[in-house]
Amino acid sequence: MSAEDHFEIANLVYRYPELIDAGDFDGIAELFRHATLRAGNNVVRGRNELVPMLKRLVRIYEGGRPFTKHLVSNLVIEVAPDRATATARSYVTVLQARPSEFPLQVIASNRHFDRFERVDGAWRFSERVDIPDLAGDLSRHVTETY
């Protein structure tokens, strides 16, 4: 694995928190446009499934944001010797606060298992499996749990 591979894959992993915390569902759909997403019994493929699911699931407030901070840690990346595929695993800790009604707190801790493929010299997601580990008060973040 080259340092460049590691950097490019890490940037893909770190891009998701930036997009979800901004409420940018179209950006998330673009990031995962070639990927299958799995969470619990839910399987989502492509923009036409992903954007409606996010709009149904994630609570958005004034300014178009969910008032969350998704923090990624413990990122481990493994690239195949031929540099055509790679995997990554990481922890995701979700913080949320709502002014005057919900003090800052950890609301979830999940693990992500990601697969990547290299196409025309660029890395992209091919799969993400989201495994919820610990849940706090998710009532202000999602409309349903999975």
Image (cartoon, grey):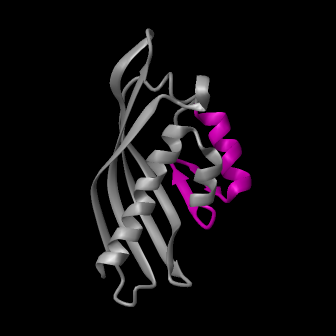
Q: What segment carries the magenta color? A: 32-58
The residue positioned 42% from the left and 15% from the top of the image is 102
| Closer-to-camera residue (46/24) | 24
| Name of the residue lying farthest toward the top | 100
Residue 38 position within the rendered picture, expressed as x and y whole percent measured from the top left: 53, 54
Residue 76 position within the rendered picture, expressed as x and y whole percent measured from the top left: 28, 64
**Residue 43 magenta-highlighted:** yes
Residue 60 in view in this figure:
no
| Closer-to-camera residue (7/135) | 7
Residue 55 position within the rendered picture, expressed as x and y whole percent measured from the top left: 66, 37
The residue positioned 62% from the left and 45% from the top of the image is 25
In the displayed structure, 96 sits above or below 127; it is above
The residue positioned 46% from the left and 56% from the top of the image is 129
Indicate the quadrant where residue 1 lies.
Answer: bottom left
| Name of the residue lying farthest toward the left | 74
Residue 101 in view in this figure:
yes
